[in-house]
Amino acid sequence: MNGLLKKSLSCLALGCTFATAPVAQAADAPAMVLVHGAHFTATAWERVQQQLGDRIDSHAIDLPGRNDHFLPEKVSLELSAASLCSFMSTIPGDKVVVAHSQGGAVVNASLSLCPDENISKLVYVTAVAPLDGEGVFSKLSEADETHYFAGVSFNEQAMRMDISNPDSFANSFAQDANAEQQRWLKQQAVAEPALIGEGTIDLNWERFEALDKYYVFAKRDQIISLESQQRTAGDLDLAASFEIDSGHLPMLTHSKDLADLLVQISER
């Protein structure tokens, strides 16, 4: 039994609670599991889910440590991955898992914890996707870090990444957002548990290689630059890739374009 699995089973034995989704009716088409990135919650996917409508049975997870009882210093990459496994176990049938940003690391870590989960495709939306032994942000650049810290500061006492300058945060994460979208962004963005970014991936290679993988590039992203995205995607043996002319939050600024791409990927 690997260390990642031991930690997660220990957490479950202690009675950790995880976000859960309502059980959906089984259908021929796969369900879609939407995993948010740093500083956001399941609400990040609201506009995409509206665009998906009844074309896809979609489920957006709230990862622990944002709007729940978990203290930030207790929220690790392992706990986040265990939460995702618990969430997926409530959704019957085949699944397409879509990860944004830091969510890509959570998804990759989950493959070791629930290797028998019925997943057919992974979709990375301007996301990190660290491989075995790699850190969550190991493929990002100094420029990415500079843009990130323009609006964020490390709260060492609380082990939390705080949004210290909302205007700079919005401009770095979604410089292409209109005024209404920027207002939404500032209202919905939350502090982020810092320990997740310190995690290292224990990847189930056999499971990972068996899955069809797709990457959606955001051409104007300043948090995970296009160069960093390309460096990440180059190691994934992709079935296909796509582009959106957006900043870091295409689910906010280009929700219809992203939803249409997700439907296209689901149907491949």
Image (spheres, rainbow, N blue to C red):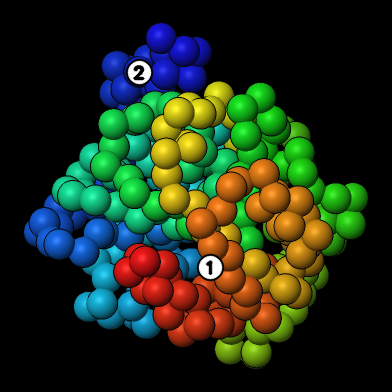
Which residue is nearer to you in this view: 149 or 134? 134
Q: Residue at x 54, y 49 (%)?
A: 103
| SS of the residue under disc 1 | helix
> What residue occupies the far top of the structure in this picture?
1
* Mark carried by residue 188: 1
| Closer to the camera in the image, 137 or 11 | 137
| 169 relative to 102, above or below | below
Q: Quadrant of the N terminus?
A: top left
Sequence-wise, the earlier of marks 2 and 1 is 2
Q: Amino acid at mark 1?
A: Gln
Amino acid under disc 2: Leu
**Horizontal and vertical percent for residue 21?**
24, 52
Instruction: Note whether 220 is above or below 222 in the view shown.
Output: below
Q: Is residue 125 visible?
A: no
Q: Which residue is identified by label 2? A: 9
Left or right, 192 with respect to 74, comes to: right
